[in-house]
Image (spheres, rainbow, N blue to C red):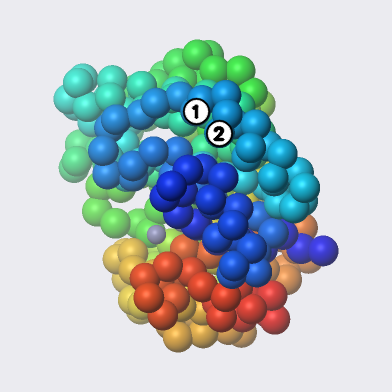
């Protein structure tokens, strides 16, 4: 059975993310390992680790992805911000290891107008530093929507993979970001172009997760706004073509849609399952 789940809250403790996954009908999940908007990070304690591991094994919920916090910018020219980013990611990866997470999904950040070429060595070096400071959990780069300054086009990610060259470096594709960055998922030949490009960049075998979101903004908008499945500009047919593409059909699916009240709900998971 395909793995389909959503980003769920850990309010009250990480084990509660599993209860929320049950409530919405998922069998895999994504969480924040701490507040998404604050640098403060702590390592999970023994008790919360064992209850999460026991409960997730009993329910057979996997994989569990951790989403890095939104403040991370590995391309900043402010050394203090880069250090905070590195420290938070190392803690996220260590927490990922103890809860047997399939990886920490990261938005790399912005070059702030300086250009990718001027920051690529810094970003690659910092990723290698984070991987060297941790043991098991994959570092998963997410593609961007192509916003001004934001790093994360497939070409840029391909270059980073080549430079970092590490077995724990992986890729997450977000359907809304792809569409907003100029991949028209409504069109089957555009999907083949996407798969060819991933193959050419050496990225195809590194994909470990699909973020499944519809897009509130138009094709190629370079503006990232998630919409509920079927209510956005991609539509159910395009989303269905993506998740059922013969080369992508085994990937776990994580929803990050607004639902009816701000977070992915049972209705959205049911739609994802029906695609
Ligand atoms: Zn995403
Ligand atoms: Zn997004």
Q: Quadrant of the N terminus?
A: bottom right
**Which quadrant is the C terminus positioned in?**
bottom right
Q: Nearer the viewer, residue 161 or 33?
A: 33
Residue 34 relative to residue 113: left or right:
right
Is 31 on the left or on the right of 209, as rendered?
Answer: left
Disc 2: residue Cβ within 8 A of ligand 1's nearest atom:
no
Tag 2: Cα neighbours inside 10 Å, few (<14), some, or many (≥20)? Answer: some
Element type at marker 1? loop
Residue 200 seen in the figure: no
**Relative to 161, is 224 on the left or the right?**
left
Taking the image in four quarters, ligand 2 sits in the one at bottom left
Q: Which image quadrant for residue 91? A: top left
- The location of residue 225, given as percent across then percent down, is 34, 68
Q: Can residue 32 be seen by looking at this rendering? A: yes
Residue picked out by circle 2? 48
Residue 171, image x, y percentages: 57, 44
Name the one closer to the observer, 153 or 66: 66
Q: Residue at x 33, y 44 (%)?
A: 36
**Label 2 secondary element:** helix
Q: CA distance from mark 1 to mark 2?
A: 7 Å
**Residues at badges 1 and 2 in contact (C-beta under 8 Å)?**
yes
Q: Residue 44, which numbered label?
A: 1
Q: Is residue 73 above or below residue 24?
A: above
Identify the residue at horizontal 50%, vertical 13% (top origin). 133
Q: Is residue 229 above or below residue 196?
A: below
């Amino acid at each position: 059975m395909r793995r389909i789940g959503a980003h769920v809250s850990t309010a009250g403790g990480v084990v509660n993310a599993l209860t929320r996954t049950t409530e919405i009908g998922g069998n895999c999940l994504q969480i924040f390992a701490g507040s998404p908007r604050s640098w403060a990070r702590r390592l999970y304690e023994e008790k919360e680790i064992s209850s999460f591991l026991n409960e997730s094994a009993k329910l057979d919920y996997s994989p569990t992805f951790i989403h890095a916090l939104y403040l991370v910018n590995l391309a900043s020219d402010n050394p203090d911000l880069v250090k905070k980013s590195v420290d938070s990611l190392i803690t996220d990866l260590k927490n990922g290891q103890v809860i047997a997470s399939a990886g920490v999904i990261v938005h790399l950040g912005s070059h702030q107008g300086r250009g990718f070429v001027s920051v690529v060595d810094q970003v690659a070096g910092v990723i290698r530093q984070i991987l060297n400071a941790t043991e098991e959990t994959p570092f998963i780069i997410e593609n961007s929507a192509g916003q001004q300054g934001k790093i994360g086009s497939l070409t840029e990610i391909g270059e980073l993979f080549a430079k970092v060259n590490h077995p724990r470096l992986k890729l997450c594709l977000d359907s809304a970001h792809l569409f907003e960055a100029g991949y028209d998922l409504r069109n089957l030949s555009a999907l083949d172009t996407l798969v060819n490009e991933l193959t050419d960049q050496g990225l195809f075998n590194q994909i470990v997760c699909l973020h499944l979101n519809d897009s509130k903004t138009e094709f190629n908008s370079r503006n990232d706004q998630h919409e509920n499945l079927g209510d956005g500009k991609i539509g159910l047919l395009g989303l269905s073509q993506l998740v059922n593409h013969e080369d992508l059909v085994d990937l776990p699916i994580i929803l990050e849609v607004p639902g009816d009240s701000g977070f992915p709900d049972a209705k959205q998971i049911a739609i994802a399952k029906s695609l």
